[in-house]
Image (cartoon, rainbow, N blue to C red):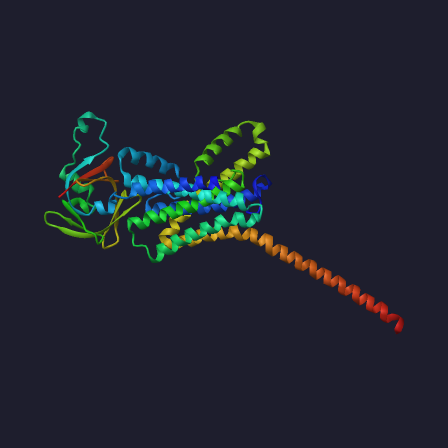
Amino acid sequence: MLRKYSNSRTLKDNLRLGVLTAYAAGMVNIASLMIFFAFASNVTGHYAILAAEIARGNWYQVAIVFGWIFLFFLGSFTSNLVVIHFNHRNTYLAHAFPLVLEILCLLTVGIYGEYFYEETLTESEFLVALMLYAMGLQNGLTASISNSKVKTTHLTGATTDLGILYSMFTKREFRENPEIRAKALLTTSIAVAYLSGGISAGFVYLQIGFKMFYIVCFFLIIVIFYDFYKLRLVRYLNLSKVKLTNNHQSFNTRSKQKKEVKAPVS
Amino acid sequence: MRVWLTYIFALGTVVLLFYALITDRVSPEQQILGEWKEISWEYEKVDKNERVARYRHISDFVKQTMGQHLIIHQAETWTFLDNGKLKLRGEDKEEIVSWTIKGRGHILELRHDNDAVEYYDITGLDQQKMMLNFDSDMQVRGIAKLTFEKI
């Protein structure tokens, strides 16, 4: 999911990454809406609110919403900065780092919410800001490494694309085009995952409250460790297998040689 | 190096802009503190029929009916205390509930002792006036608006 970049990524890579991160984003967004009454992943609404608050002259609200939008921007900026500057050194680490940051942000929200949250406005604003930064990190990363094919924190573009794609399917030539079918599959999967994440967050939050953020972190940890497993564990096992086979072969050869040496003596 | 300086300058400008916007502005949490007197309940979305549209104000009977599940229907003065408590005072009744403000300072959450929760949109708040909106799923169509004056 994370170790490949841009056009070298397969549909399977994008599907796995898109579904898991969109599910996490859907959960974060609904949790934020239910707890803090503010969206944490889709920023379009915040732009509209910013404009409305400027028009009304509510400068406190203008500052808060402006800060939230800026943090989403900063998250995306951080992700791509890390990817483009460290990609050549270690692709996997450069791609995993923004997700590690995201997990830290969401863990902070979960732990703070569970043990320290006193429901003041400043705390709410700060926690929403952290979530927006986390979502910026995620969207920046997925868009950056997938050549903008995977965007998982909002569905405006995805819904537009789906409208276009499904209208294209009315023509046979497009229906049979594997590239268009792949794009439709990816976009539909992301939309379904985002919605499912949101619905499950609605139920889960009522049961376990802020602990729900640990579940979101769990999904992101799967994303990170899937490639870690592929890269390290499988390679380690393969190497061990090769070593074992080599050892076995050399043992056989040596024992054969010994037998050959011993034979003339007896 | 020059590029990085440009980026640092841009970031500094944004932080300064944020600081300028946030300082000297009173947070809604501070602004709401004190005693407020209810002056009106109104329909925001009135009926298209002109004969009905003239009646924007809600009668006491309707107010009682639509607000029977809400805590505010008998309170004429609301006193927001800085310990997170709200004193609701009516003609012959007084109740204390907990209050918090959420979102970007636009949602007022009121919590009863029995954990029942009510939410109101703060659509206007300044030194003299406060406007709250709430949706009712009863026979009252549209959004009702409550206006308060600072005492």
Q: Is residue A99 left or right of residue A248?
A: left
Residue A198 position within the rendered picture, expressed as x and y whole percent measured from the top left: 41, 45
- Residue at point 52% right, 51% down? A224
Query: Is residue B75 visible in the rendered structure shown here?
Result: no
- Residue at point 54% right, 38% down? A147
Residue found farthest to the right: A264
- Residue at point 73% right, 63% down? A248
Residue found farthest to the top: B50
Residue A247 position within the rendered picture, expressed as x and y whole percent measured from the top left: 72, 63
- Residue at point 52% right, 39% down? A186
Which residue is more in the foreground, B3 or B122? Answer: B3
Which residue is more in the foreground, A238 or A27? Answer: A238
Q: Is residue A48 left or right of residue A2?
A: left
Residue A65 position within the rendered picture, expressed as x and y whole percent measured from the top left: 34, 40
Report the label total: 0
Which residue is more in the foreground, B89 or A255? Answer: A255
Q: Quadrant of the C terminus of chain A?
A: bottom right
Q: Is residue A109 left or right of residue B136?
A: right
Residue found farthest to the left: B91
Reply above or below: A18 against B52. Answer: below
Residue B21 position within the rendered picture, expressed as x and y whole percent measured from the top left: 30, 40
Query: Is residue A17 visible in the rendered structure shown here?
Result: yes
- Determine the image quadrant of residue A255: bottom right
Reply above or below: A84 against B48. Answer: below
Residue found farthest to the bottom: A266
